[in-house]
């Protein structure tokens, strides 16, 4: 006895919904990053124009050096602020994606194991020891899948946190 078509359709529907959520998260976070990049670029361009205008009116070389130094400092601060904001967006996105992937792995695995259990319940197995052995096997498999899901989530978090930590210069500690 196989899984009912309704069960398969429901699992496929949930997988598709999760994929759509993942795509939506990716699009939203990409838009946020682009908005930050555009804002920083626009601000830096405006500052460059203003700096060029100010430099054109300066006669004293020391004043020109001071103005360029201030401009460089302001530019660096804006770039670093933008990088921090992008890192915060990435951290939030990573958390959301990790949660979504973990939930999807856990739910999908549980549903597949449940379908297998239902299939075995429908089989004409007279020996109770055989049924107990099958049930123990399924329980062991469920536990292994849950551990694999947790390990996958932790590995995903560790993988995605490394670039964010390098970008921000902040060290992160994990569980």
Image (cartoon, rainbow, N blue to C red):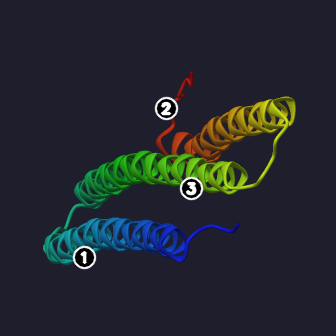
Mark 3 sits on what residue?
108
Mark 2 sits on what residue?
170
Q: Residue at x 20, y 69 (%)?
A: 43
Return the disc, 2 or 3, that comes first in the chain's sequence.
Answer: 3
Return the mark for residue 147.
none
Q: Residue at x 19, y 68 (%)?
A: 59
Which image quadrant: the C terminus? top right
Task: Report the Cα–Cα distance between label 3 and label 1.
Answer: 50 Å
Return the disc, 3 or 1, that comes first in the chain's sequence.
Answer: 1
| Mark count | 3
Q: Is 29 left, or right, of 44 in this rendering?
A: right
Residue 117 vs residue 155, the one in the foreground: 117
Which image quadrant: the N terminus? bottom right
Residue 162 vertical position relative to residue 104 in the rendered view, above or below: above
Residue 37 vs residue 164, the one in the foreground: 164
Task: Report the Cα–Cα distance between label 2 and label 3.
Answer: 35 Å
């Amino acid at each position: 006895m196989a899984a009912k078509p309704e069960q398969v359709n429901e699992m496929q529907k949930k997988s598709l919904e999760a994929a759509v959520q993942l795509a939506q998260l990716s699009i939203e976070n990409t838009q946020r990053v682009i908005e930050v990049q555009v804002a920083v670029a626009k601000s830096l361009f405006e500052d460059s124009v203003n700096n060029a205008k100010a430099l054109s009116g300066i006669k004293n070389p020391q004043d020109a050096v001071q103005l360029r130094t201030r401009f460089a400092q302001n530019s660096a601060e804006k770039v670093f602020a933008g990088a921090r904001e992008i890192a915060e967006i990435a951290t939030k996105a990573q958390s959301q994606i990790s949660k979504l992937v973990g939930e999807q792995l856990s739910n999908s695995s549980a549903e597949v194991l449940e379908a297998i259990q239902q299939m075995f319940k429908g089989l004409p197995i007279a020996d109770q020891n055989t049924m107990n052995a099958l049930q123990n096997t399924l329980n062991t498999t469920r536990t292994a899948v849950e551990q694999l899901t947790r390990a996958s989530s932790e590995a995903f978090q560790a993988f995605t946190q490394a670039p964010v930590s390098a970008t921000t210069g902040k060290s992160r500690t994990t569980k």
